[in-house]
Amino acid sequence: MKRVITKIGDVFRVDLKSGGARYLQYVANDMTQLNSEVLRVFKTIRDNSEAPNLDEIVRDAIDFHVHSDTRAGIKMQCWEKVGKAAVYGEVETLFRQAGDREVGIPKIKVSTRWSVWYINQPMQYVGPLKGGNRKSERGSVFPPFAVVARMETGDYGFFEYAFE
């Protein structure tokens, strides 16, 4: 397979099983989370036979932001690169991560040990998620197929800790 190169601003199309297509854009690298790529997923389901208007797509309403790997998504045929556009607006998403991953903690279903952060900012321990922190995005680095699952169903298909 040919070497895949992706850069900030690249736009990708995901063909949905239910028909239509959704788009995502590579918008940042997050040094706080393994220098992973941050993707912006747009809400609108579009006709997959249309030629995409990238300027219109990147100004669409944002569904969510996620850490993933664009090159792996192409290689796994989860999405295809359709072009490049300027990153519209600020990328100020709040991410969260539970601190209950130590070995030996049996079947924790409710976490009260959360940390939150903005892209490239230090993580801050906040304990239980309260207020605006409850609207934060999960900060794990997700495999491309999980990103597609969330685009199709609204859920990554993985276990998620409860807030409290």
Image: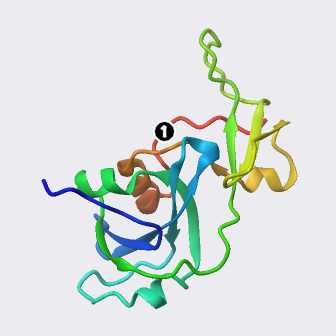
Q: Looking at the image, which is closer to me, 107 or 32?
A: 32
Q: What's the residue at 46%, 70% (across, down)?
A: 25
Looking at this rendering, what residue extends furthest in the left direction? 1
Q: What's the residue at 73%, 50% (across, down)?
A: 121
Q: Looking at the image, which is closer to me, 103 or 30?
A: 30
Residue 16 in the image, given as x and y percentages of width and height: 31, 67
In the figure, 95 relative to 79: above or below?
Answer: above
In the figure, 53 relative to 28: above or below?
Answer: below
Q: Amino acid at mark 1?
A: Phe
Query: On the rendered image, what quadrant is the C terminus found in?
Result: top right
The residue at which mark 1 appears reads as 158
Residue 92 in the image, given as x and y percentages of width and height: 70, 65
Q: Is residue 23 left or right of residue 40?
A: left
Q: Is residue 91 left or right of residue 79?
A: right
Q: What's the residue at 66%, 27% (across, down)?
A: 109
Could you tell me how many numbered marks the image carries? 1
Tag 1: Cα neighbours inside 10 Å, few (<14), some, or many (≥20)?
A: few
Q: Quadrant of residue 151?
A: bottom left
Element assignment for label 1: loop
Residue 157 in the image, given as x and y percentages of width and height: 45, 43
Q: What's the residue at 65%, 13% (across, down)?
A: 105
Color scheme of the displayed model: rainbow
Residue 108 in the image, given as x and y percentages of width and height: 66, 22
In the figure, 126 relative to 101: above or below?
Answer: below
In the figure, 60 relative to 139: above or below?
Answer: below
